[in-house]
Amino acid sequence: MRRLGKQKEEDGAEIDLTPMLDVVFIMLIFFIVVASFIKEAGVEINRPDNSKSDPSDATSILVNIRADNQIWMENRRVDVRSVRANIQRLLAADPEQAVTIKVEKGARANAVVNVADAAREAGAGAVNWASEGGQR
């Protein structure tokens, strides 16, 4: 003999998922909108086109930062702590010289900022930027 009560219990056990799907879609839209407002932290650099000028002219102090973060001045490798003293020594000969920082692709921003800070602390009137090659 069949029980009629058992069949009614199975029919009433359905769960309506429509409200849950509505909430999920609203959350998805919220996170997409919020993610578009978040700006990543970083330093934006506009690299100039090097085909027009030569940054290593005679009136500037050239500091090279290679891709492996080695710092070179006057064809010799220098430590980041001695950059300021070297720039001060070169500025003593000609205080009107500008400092040109030539950065290779792959150099860390930390090394670039440290060299720029050292140039400003040394009293450089102008700090110029150069990059290796053409457009990157």
Image: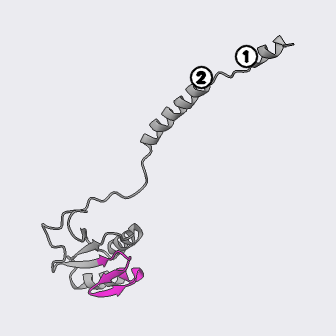
Assign a secondary structure to mark 2: helix
Residue 106 or residue 75, whichever sits in front: 106
Q: Nearer the viewer, residue 54 or 36?
A: 36
Query: Viewed as shown, does residue 69 lie left or right of 57?
Result: right
Relative to 61, say whether 47 is above or below.
above
- Please provide percent x and percent y for residue 65: 32, 76
Q: Which mark is residue 92?
A: none
Residue farthest toward the front in the current orientation of the protein? 1
**Between discs 1 and 2, the one toward the N terminus:** 1
Which residue is identified by label 2? 18
What element does badge 1 sit on? helix
For this rendering, which residue is in front, 49 or 57?
A: 49
Q: Amino acid at mark 1?
A: Asp
Identify the residue at the far left of this view.
52
Q: State the image coordinates of residue 87 (x, y, percent, origin top left).
A: 30, 81
Residue 104, position as x, y percentages in the image:
30, 72
- Up-down: is 71 above or below 112? below
Which of the 4 quarters of the picture holds residue 63?
bottom left
Q: Say which mark, if any, is on residue 11.
A: 1
| Image position of 35 (left or right of 66) | right
Q: Amino acid at mark 2?
A: Thr
Residue located farthest toward the top when viewing the structure as drawn? 4
- Within 10 angstroms of label 1, few (less than 14), some, or many (20 or more) residues? few
- From what the image shows, is residue 63 above or below residue 75? above
Q: Is residue 71 magenta?
A: yes
Q: Which residues are magenta?
A: 64-84
Q: Is residue 22 magenta?
A: no
Picture residue at 78% right of the left edge, 15% below the top? 7
Label total for image: 2
Q: Residue at x 33, y 71 (%)?
A: 120
**84 or 12: which is nearer to us?**
12
